[in-house]
Image (cartoon, grey):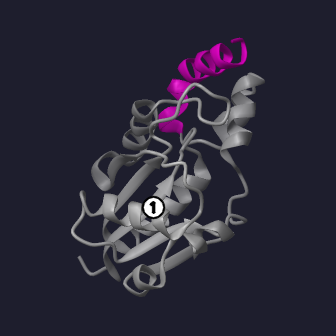
């Protein structure tokens, strides 16, 4: 296929999927032959920070990217930003792809703490500035709660716009508990 890397990895919560995530995934797709996209906090749902189930987030990703990516769940361990988290991340990825050649992520300082020196020596790291598209999941969740569908549509792919009523109902259910 001729890309720089054979197998790439991205981790995100995608709560919900927005154009910043889409930018990162498209960038990664341009650099590697196969891309594994882990849906983090897959075992969390029903809270303001993690409102949507793994299946709902998977549906958003597959609606936008079809079969261009491999989508898989990654549960939280509750251990913090330590090298054992990085080991867990890589070992989990190896269940879906033969190797992790590159890890793509937004420029979050905590990501540097996830990997032991040994693991870090075998993986390339491609850091994407979050300032390229300065939007966060919490902003999208606020648009949904405030019924600001226009802003939701500006910052999300049109392929998931039809999901807005379902996403809004779920958010309203959570805040009205």
Would you say residue 166 sits in the magenta stretch? Answer: yes
User: Neighbour class for label 1 at 10 Å: few (<14), some, many (≥20)?
Assistant: many
| 82 to the left or right of 31 | right
- Residue 71's spot in the image, x, y percent? 34, 48
Q: Is residue 56 above or below residue 131?
A: above
Residue located beneath label 1 in the image: 10
Within the magenta stretch, is there residue 61?
A: no
What is the x, y in percent for residue 55? Answer: 39, 32
Magenta segment, principal secondary structure?
helix
* Left or right: where 137 falls relative to 157: right
Q: Can residue 106 be seen in this snapshot?
A: yes
Along the viewing direction, whichever of 25 and 97 lies nearer the viewer: 97
> Image point 27% across, 72% down: which residue?
99
Image quarter in which the C terminus is found = top right
The quadrant where residue 3 appears: bottom left
Q: Which residue is drawn at 37% across and 84% down?
A: 122
Work out whether 78 lies above or below 163.
below
Camera sees residue 108: no
Vertical side of 11 occupied by 83: above or below: below
- Magenta region, residue range: 158-177
């Amino acid at each position: 296929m001729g890309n720089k890397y054979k197998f790439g990895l991205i981790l995100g919560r995608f709560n919900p999927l927005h154009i910043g995530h889409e930018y990162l995934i498209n960038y990664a797709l341009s650099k590697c032959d196969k891309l594994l996209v882990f849906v983090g906090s897959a075992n969390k749902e029903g809270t303001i920070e993690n409102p949507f189930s793994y299946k709902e987030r998977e549906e958003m990703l597959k609606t936008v990217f079809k079969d261009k990516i491999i989508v898989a769940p990654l549960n939280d361990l509750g251990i913090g930003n330590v090298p054992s988290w990085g080991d867990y991340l890589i070992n989990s990825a190896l269940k879906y792809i033969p190797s992790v050649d590159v890890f793509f992520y937004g420029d979050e300082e905590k990501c540097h703490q996830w990997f032991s020196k040994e693991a870090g020596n075998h993986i390339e790291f491609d850091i994407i500035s979050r300032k390229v598209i300065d939007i966060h999941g919490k902003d999208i969740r606020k648009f949904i709660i405030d019924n600001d569908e226009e802003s939701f549509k500006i910052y999300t792919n049109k392929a998931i716009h039809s999901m807005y009523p379902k996403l809004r109902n779920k958010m309203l259910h959570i805040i009205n508990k």
